[in-house]
Image (spheres, rainbow, N blue to C red):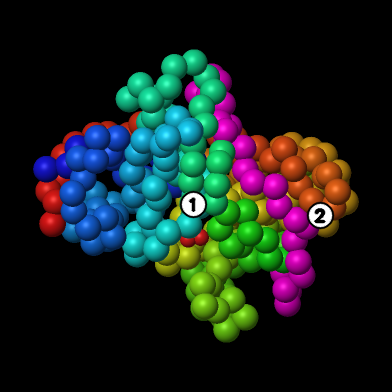
Amino acid sequence: MIKFYKYQGAGNDFVLVDNRKNAFKGDKIAWCKQVCDRKYGIGSDGLIFIENHATYDFKMDFYNPDGSQSFCGNGSRCAVSFAKHIGVFNGNKVSFEAIDGEHEAIVADGIIKVHMQNVGFPTLNGEGYFMDTGSPHFMQFVADIHQVDIHSFGRGIRFDPRFEPNGTNVNIIEEKSKNQIAIRTYERGVEAETLACGTGATACALAFAYENELNKGDIQVKAIGGDLSVSFEVVNQAYENVWLSGPAKFVFEGEMALG
Ligand SMILES: N[C@@H](CCC[C@H](N)C(=O)O)C(=O)O
């Protein structure tokens, strides 16, 4: 049996496993598919192993429900909250390595802030923008996010030949005010709408900043499952000092059979 912990960040939910002692001996991809299944497993938008790292406080090994790998913003915020709970670090600052490189995070008043990689301006792609914030995101501005069939719209773009071979996550953005947007995201690897997506929220906030020629700011992002925020500044035609912030909460723990 493998001990697991379930967390969620703005409704983006994850199963986490403390694998610092390499207790997990199975096939991670096969187990991930079973764990994330909402009928036959625990049910989640991804599986995360917390492992030791020679240089940083820990390594985050993230898998989508289909077993593919990418960087996960909300998953990393949940990983930080879990790492603190199991004593990987004391205090309020931590560093970790993910598939896209090193990240720092800060824990304060129940909010987890993760430092994202620097990223260039979004590129225009058909009716929308494209940007890679650790995961690839297509984004289109719409008048009302609730009037779009996100599943068929998202699926069409996710599998469009333009984004082959890896595909893309798909977001729609509605401007709410000068520093607030509402978004919905169809996630690659989940192959469905999720209640929030951290790399998606980051890409959408930066696309909004680009459209409005903002050089610095803190954009409030209303996802379907909760509120996130993204702060940034423009340095040399790129976004730097990018931080994704929001809640990350423990839900329950248990044990699941291997295989
Ligand atoms: N939910 C994540 C993104 C996870 C990766 C994504 N599904 C992909 O494969 O690109 C987030 O919060 O960033």
Q: Secondary structure at mark 1?
A: loop
Q: Main secondary structure of the magenta part?
A: strand
Q: Quadrant of residue 132?
A: bottom right
Please state if 148 lies on the left or on the right of 19 as rendered.
right
Asked if the beta carbon under badge 1 is closer than 8 A to the nearest atom of ligand 1, the reply is: no
Q: Amino acid at mark 2?
A: Tyr
How many numbered tags mark residues here? 2
Please state if 121 lies on the left or on the right of 75 as rendered.
right
Most foreground residue, 249 or 166: 166
Return the residue at label 2.
Answer: 210
Return the residue at label 1.
Answer: 99
Rounded to the nearest angstrom, the CA distance separating label 2 from label 1 is: 26 Å
Q: Which region shows up in magenta?
A: 104-128
Q: Position of residue 255 (x, y in %)?
A: 16, 39
Q: Position of residue 197 (x, y in %)?
A: 53, 51
Q: Can residue 175 be seen from the camera position used here?
A: no
- Asked if the residue under mark 1 is in contact with the one under mark 2, i.e. CB atoms within 8 Å, the reply is no
